[in-house]
Image (tube, rainbow, N blue to C red):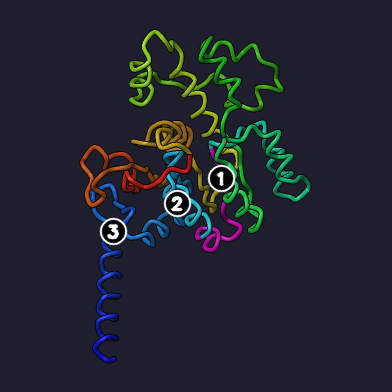
Amino acid sequence: MYKRNFIIAITAILLVSMSADKRAFNLFNAKGKLVNYDKVLDEAAKADIVFFGELHNNAISHWLEYQLAIDLAEKKDSNLVLGAEMYESDGQLLINEYLSGLVKYKYFKGQARLWPNDNTDYRPLLQIAHDKKIPFIATNVPRRYASAVNKGGFEILEQFSDEAKKYFAPLPIDYDGNVACYKSMQEMMGKHGANIAKAQGLKDATMAYFILKNWEKGKTFLHFNGSYHSDNYEGIIWHLKRKNPDLKIISISTVEQADINKIDEETQKKADYILVVDENVTKTY
């Protein structure tokens, strides 16, 4: 009996050891060194603005976003603001009504132009805001205005009403086509998307605008967006730094790799912290 129990115990230990070696992700700092989650959390709690750059269908991204939001809410209490690219600025009233309990999710869902994965990936973040009674800000430009810029450039924005102009960054839109993220996007699209980088610039400028509008000193604004909007300290971060260079900003970027145990120099430059996820992790959609 003793021998059988000993064998079972050893087998269990070996199985645990084997499973512990099979990690789904690692966290690195900008120097390419492995860091633990608590380090990221502590730095985020000290920041003015935190950008979590996700891959939209990456399950680990969404899980860690949720964990970071929960833990920051515990650390910061009422000094936390949440916001996301996935909600458009003209839907702020709907968010406020839903979080207040006045409107059920099915009505919110029917009118807020939600992403297909909202129920599984972003609704839980809204629930944190609801439970902790903290603001959740819809930062992105309504897609109809980005589409208009894609067709007609920034000039077309002047033709919209004063009411419409409340939902995007003040004109004229601050934009530099030589910023690498815009330049590379435009070069990639060529003649097929004459103003696509400007449309991206409108999104970034608008998100920066609503982040600053809803942030105040002493608070941390945790923002969720696709990595491209904050990678390499460009996109939204470029706009924020133009408005307030003294902001303490922490950025997180997500990448998928076959080998999660190291990152190259180019990847290191993407953000303050890099979430490296096994490329075989299942997708949320």
Assess whether residue 54 is covered by the magenta stretch. Answer: no
Q: Quadrant of residue 213?
A: top right
Q: Amino acid at mark 3?
A: Lys
Q: Amino acid at mark 1?
A: Tyr
Looking at this view, is 275 or 183 the one in front?
275
Query: Considering only order in the chain, which callout, 1 or 2, is on the residue closer to the N terminus?
Result: 2
Q: CA distance from mark 3 to mark 1?
A: 28 Å
Can you identify the residue that label 3 sits on?
A: 22
Residue 217 image label: none
Query: In the image, is 139 to the left or to the right of 67?
Result: right
Q: CA distance from mark 2 to mark 1?
A: 22 Å
Looking at this view, is 198 or 228 the one in front?
228
Looking at this view, is 23 or 269 the one in front?
23
Can you identify the residue that label 2 sits on?
A: 47
Can you identify the residue that label 1 sits on?
A: 122
Q: Position of residue 59 (x, y in %)?
A: 44, 47
Check disc 1: other Cα within 10 Å, few if <14, some if 14-19, many if 20+.
Answer: some
Q: Is residue 43 visible?
A: yes
Q: Which of the two discs, 2 and 3, sits closer to the camera?
A: 3
Q: Position of residue 236 (x, y in %)?
A: 45, 33
Query: In the image, is 6 to the left or to the right of 145?
Result: left
The range drawn in magenta is: 71-84
Check disc 3: other Cα within 10 Å, few if <14, some if 14-19, many if 20+.
Answer: few
Task: Kindly state the secondary structure of the residue where label 2 is placed.
Answer: loop
Assess whether residue 83 is covered by the magenta stretch. Answer: yes
Task: Kindly state the secondary structure of the residue where label 3 is placed.
Answer: loop
